[in-house]
Amino acid sequence: MITRARALGDSPLWWTGVALLLVVLGVDVLLGRQVNGAYGGAAVLAAVYADPRRTASVAGVGLLLSVASGTWHHNLGERDWALRLATCVLISALALVSSYANEKRRRRLLHTTALAQRVLDSLAVELTGARTVKEVAEGFLGNAMATMGATSAMVMSLDDDDVLRTLTWHGRAGSAADQYSEVPLASDVPGAVAVRERRDIHYRSLAEIVAGFPGLAGYYTGERTLHLLPLQREDRVHGLLALTFPPDLFTPHEDGFLHSLAGALTAAVERAQELQRADAARQRTLLLAEMSMSLSRTLDTAATVAECGRILVPRFADWCSVRLVRDGVPGPASVTAGETGSRGEALLHVFPAARVQASGRSQLYPYVPAHLLEAAAIGPEHRAALRALAPTSAVVVPLRGQDGVLGTMTLVQAGSARHYDAADVAFLEAAADRVAVALETAAAFEQQSELLADVTLVADAAQRAILAPPPPRAGPVALAARYRSASTAAQVGGDLYEVVTGPTSVRLLVGDVRGKGLGAVRTATIVLGEFRAAAAGTDDVAHVASEIDRRILPYLPDGEDFVTALLVDIRDDGTFDVVSCGHPPPVVLPASGLVVPLAMEHSPPLGLGIGVDPTPLHGRLAPGDRMLLFTDGLIEARAPDGRFVDPEPFLAEMGGRDLDGALDGLLQSLTRATGHALEDDLALVLACYDPVDDPDRVPSVSVVRPA
């Protein structure tokens, strides 16, 4: 564009005006036809391609030749000659006026295109690394101020609630314009009108600005122009660009340039929005993986809360608060402030968590309106602090444990200009579930640590803390469990079980830790915690087993320690998956009274450091079918004569009783058969597939063998 503008002033085509002079001269002299008025046409032709200086030269020569024409036609001073001369003078004058106008337009074009080139070049460098809308706006306004000579510049975003909110503002002076930092789209403020009607609005003087914005009377100290430019592309408006300049710096001739500039900013904003969405999705995935791995290693409540804040701030929030509930009373908030520092204390109590605590449902603030901050402020200083922090979005999520809501977690964006959405809420709820699991594990471990001060008195309590009774029902599965220690001296064994309810399935774990005593308690606690953390996700049970195997290795310093485990996943439709890591397989007890052992492949036990990759066995339970999970104390019990007791007859008798009665009867029958107390620990979990709305009954115990 600049090259073309310069070429208009340097084109050799202006010589066509000289050529026309020669042609007219030939007609005038050689053909004897007096056409001295036509010499002015050469000036017109020159004006099209030449600057005023060259046009004047051609016009001057043409006038001289027009006068000379009267000499060689011998009519100098006569009426015909004078009329033609006057015509030549008039045409030449018009050509000069046109040439001067063209030159002025050419210089304006050169100025505008050069300015556009400088702005675009600087923006290309500035915005190369920008990945958020705020970074784009900051870089754009910085260049507008430096390159274009703007006295102030502001970018506003049009949010989903039809409110224009200030994204960034350069050259702001004083607080008189605060009333325009948040503008409803339906208002009569010129900025809202420009966005609503999708047209540029230009104010050429301070008087026009004050007429449009009465609240700015006295705000500006000198004369200036104001330009309001909607950021729009096709059928969508993203916001508003507002620029002020010294008078006469930008005239109506440059309005098109400013419109194009707003278009360039719109394109950059759309690109940043796409990058922002992609980065947020990738960040959510990474943070969730990191949180699962990191929180599974913490066995302390305070450390768990601190680790949660460390992971989320500043990558997903500018400020984070975790408030736990003890005995029904909210405790003090644990705050991770990030760059907000001590100023972030002002955000406490702005986003109340009592409703979330009571309902167990998340509260999303996609935008933080000014009236919310005004209502939360407890005084002028607090109000000023909240305005300085300028929170843009917030979300409060519950920490849901197995026995209710453990507390709440509040996250705030206050400086990054990012807004939380439904996808963020889903991510934070998943993260909160992991935090809740870690808190429950830490609380159980802390409680056990306190109780273990006296080993002989604490052993039984620790066992009960580890092997708490499962809920009577988890989803479509009714449950009962029993544990019997082989020793009467309160020496804790390493048998364990756990139940975790997922979105579409119930996951069961039965395992056996090598050894006894406090070392076995500690290992069992770690295995249970890792199972809760891994089972909370959506991965299959084979992957869950692999995750537990990988995560418990740092806690097994003795190379001979290991854990056998059986993991079962029962889905809402009755289908199930089973994997075994060196553990006895389960037995299915159909409603018909049969005993169906499941033959399956075994993977090595967990914790040996060689890795496990178990092969799942797939099957389906009909309503009323039961599955018994047990440790080796059931199949290794011995009769008085030393023979192993066959438990199958006892299992066949379990079908006619309720779940608790069935397990109690099994233990009584086993004790009678051995003639004495059990010599090995025994853990039993009985699961009955019992959906509330029974579908049509399917064939019992449909089993698909692993390939």
Image (spheres, helix red, strand yellow):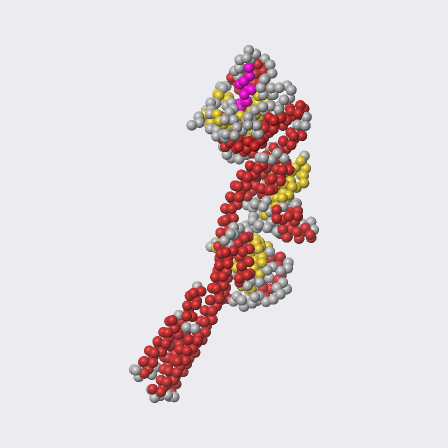
**In the rendered image of this protein, does residue 607 appear above or below residue 376?**
above
Q: Residue at x 41, y 80 (%)?
A: 60
Q: Is residue 358 visible?
A: no
Q: Residue at x 67, y 30 (%)?
A: 450
> Where does residue 192 sit, x and y in percent of width and height?
55, 57
In the displayed structure, does residue 62 sit left or right of residue 589? Answer: left
**In the rendered image of this protein, does residue 106 appear above or below residue 400?**
below
The reply to whether the magenta stretch includes residue 624 is yes
Q: Residue at x 49, y 27 (%)?
A: 603
For the N terminus, which image quadrant?
A: bottom left
Viewer-closest of 657 and 321: 321
Outermost residue on the top side: it is 641
Which is the main secondary structure of the residues drawn in magenta? loop
Please identify the quarter of the rendering in which residue 478 is found.
top right
**In the rendered image of this protein, does residue 224 appear above or below residue 578?**
below
Q: Residue at x 50, y 65 (%)?
A: 254
> Where does residue 334 sit, x and y in percent of width and height?
65, 41
For the C terminus, which image quadrant?
A: top left
Viewer-closest of 480 and 523: 523
Total number of numbered discs in the rendering = 0
- The range drawn in magenta is 622-638
The reply to whether the magenta stretch includes residue 199 is no
Outermost residue on the left side: it is 31
> Where does residue 29 sit, x and y in percent of width and height?
32, 83
Outermost residue on the right side: it is 379
Please identify the quarter of the rendering in which residue 25 is found.
bottom left
Q: Is residue 313 visible?
A: yes
**In the rendered image of this protein, does residue 688 appear above or below residue 418?**
above
